[in-house]
Amino acid sequence: MPDTLNSIAVLTSGGDAPGMNAAIRAVVRKGIFHNLKVYGIKRGYEGLIHGEFREMSLGSVADIVHRGGTVLMTARTEEMKTPEGQQKAREQLKMRGIDGLIVIGGDGSFRGALALSAQGVKVIGIPGTIDNDIAGTDLTIGFDTAVNTVVDAVSKIRDTATSHERTFIVEVMGRNCGSIALQAGVACGAESILVPEIPFDLEDIILKLRRGHRRGKNHSIILAAEGAASAYKLAEELHAHSGFDTRVTILGHLQRGGNPSALDGVIASAMGGKAVELLLAGKSEMMTAYVNQEVTEVPLNAAFAPKRPFNRKLYELAQELAI
Ligand code: ATP
């Protein structure tokens, strides 16, 4: 261990995601195990700039591994994007003798980390966002839980869709990335999956609905990422062109909450531990990543590479299965 590393800090930034608490717990416990002083910073960079630090004990992270959200809370702040804000953030770390910072968040949060790195702070990123839209890692913390939440919600919606012989458009999160819609759509056998990466064809959706109807199918689920279509407008158009009774459910923020799935709990814990290991090894500007079912590390810059390619194969399979 480089002898300069005595104290580290951890913060969560950007959107919260189930599993962030498991990652915080792992950072704290692993750090203390290795005789480090570990600080938790409240409210992301907002709290960093304004000095909201508290030293974490083993007990401070008891009973959180299974809880959604983030006990450190999260925030977005424009101040961190300014040289003055970054300077203040650096000073806050310096006055406490903190040499290493672990940032749990999305790619915006990692840009903040890189700005601190330019001022001599060792930084490690942990990808935490339900959207799974960070390059360099197969999974981000929270994605698996969000997909499970959507699948659970859709199976409940199917009950009422069947009873009333209705078509439901279920809107899920994903402004630029259709991963949640695609994975959940395949898992719950949605009749159509709409993603921002691939323009949809209204005629095709109607064709599928009619085909299903002729086979005696009395309900349909269209899973739409928020960036793919306006759910209400689509419902109007579908009704106008096909006559099918179409309803909309927007799942919204409930997709962000809930206890992390077992997979998220494991990945988050492993990433938290890995992040501390990287700091102990004197590394910086790295991101923990889940690649080929293993937690490893990649350069933090990898997160800014063009987005991970859309899983077209799975999308095409979904099309075939929903014939
Ligand atoms: P999510 O994917 O959940 O939106 P994110 O980390 O990408 O997470 P952002 O809102 O983009 O979320 O960024 C979170 C915070 O990171 C911002 O509020 C800001 O404080 C900081 N940040 C973002 N971009 C930069 C940047 N270019 N330079 C410095 N700090 C930044």
Image: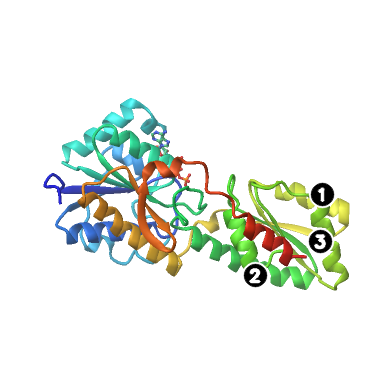
Furthest-left residue in this view: 3
Q: How is the image coloured?
A: rainbow
Q: Amino acid at mark 1?
A: Glu
Q: Is ligand 1 within 8 Å of the beta carbon of the residue shown at mark 2?
A: no
Category of crowding for the residue at label 3, using alpha-carbon neighbours closer than 10 angstroms: few (below 14), some (14–19), many (at least 20): some
Q: Give the residue at mark 1.
A: 237
In front here: 268 or 169? Answer: 268
Q: In which quadrant of the rendered image does the C terminus lie?
A: bottom right
Q: Earlier in the sequence, mark 3 or mark 1?
A: 3
Q: Nearer the viewer, mark 3 or mark 2?
A: 3
Q: Give the residue at mark 3.
A: 208
Q: 116 above or below 57?
A: above
Give the residue displayed 31% in from the left and 41% down from the top: 47
- Report if the CB atoms under discs 3 and 2 are less than 8 Å apart: no
Left or right for 62, reference 218: left
Give the residue displayed 34% in from the left and 37% down from the top: 114
Q: Quadrant of residue 192?
A: bottom right
Secondary structure type for disc 1 = helix
Q: Which mark is residue 315?
A: none
Q: 321 above or below 238?
A: below
Q: Nearer the viewer, mark 3 or mark 1?
A: 3
Q: CA distance from mark 3 to mark 2?
A: 22 Å
Left or right for 12, reference 314: left
Q: Quadrant of residue 52?
A: top left
Residue 266 in percent (x, y) is at: 38, 66
Q: CA distance from mark 3 to mark 1?
A: 15 Å
Give the residue displayed 63% in from the left and 54% down from the top: 312
Residue 22 seen in the current view: no
Q: Earlier in the sequence, mark 3 or mark 2?
A: 2
Q: CA distance from mark 1 to mark 2?
A: 25 Å
Residue 18 in percent (x, y) is at: 44, 59
Q: Give the residue at mark 2.
A: 156
